[in-house]
Image (cartoon, rainbow, N blue to C red):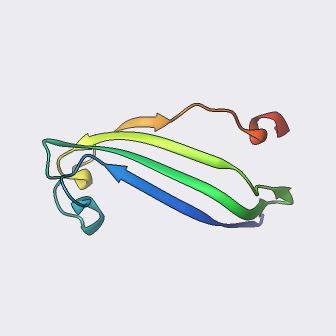
Amino acid sequence: MSFSVEGDYFEVCNCDVSCNCVWLGTATQDNCDVLLAWHVTNGDKDGVDLSGLNAVMAVHSPKRMTDGGWKGGPVPGRSRFRRAV
């Protein structure tokens, strides 16, 4: 089994200035609402080309993300991967 991926990562949350959760701190609001996004510029999984794929996940978590109890999941969208499978 082989896996390789390169690309870009984007994150935006509802904190006042910057995301304290990255440093295992608490959110500046009562909870953390965050969108996480990835764009694969180059990659493959067992010979399947992953280049050009995008993924987005929406998350709602407590003020301290490490407390667990996250709610969320993938944001639906069109993807060539879905057609390839």
Going 47% across and 57% down the picture, which residue do you hit?
Answer: 10
Spot occupied by residue 75 in the image (x, y as percentages of width and height): 52, 34
Going 63% across and 65% down the picture, which residue do you hit?
Answer: 7
In depth, the one of 32 and 14 nearer the eye is 14
Q: Is residue 69 above or below residue 18?
A: above
In depth, the one of 23 and 39 nearer the eye is 39
Going 25% across and 52% down the picture, which residue do you hit?
Answer: 65
Going 84% across and 39% down the picture, which residue do you hit?
Answer: 84
Spot occupied by residue 27 in the image (x, y as percentages of width and height): 18, 53
Is residue 43 visible to us here? Answer: yes
Residue 84 as seen in the image, left or right of residue 22: right
In depth, the one of 70 and 43 nearer the eye is 43
Spot occupied by residue 80 in the image (x, y as percentages of width and height): 78, 40
Give the tally of numbered discs. Answer: 0
Image quarter hosting the C terminus: top right
Image quarter hosting the N terminus: bottom right
Residue 31 as seen in the image, left or right of residue 79: left
Is residue 70 visible to us here? Answer: no
Spot occupied by residue 66 in the image (x, y as percentages of width and height): 25, 55
Residue 28 as seen in the image, left or right of residue 48: left
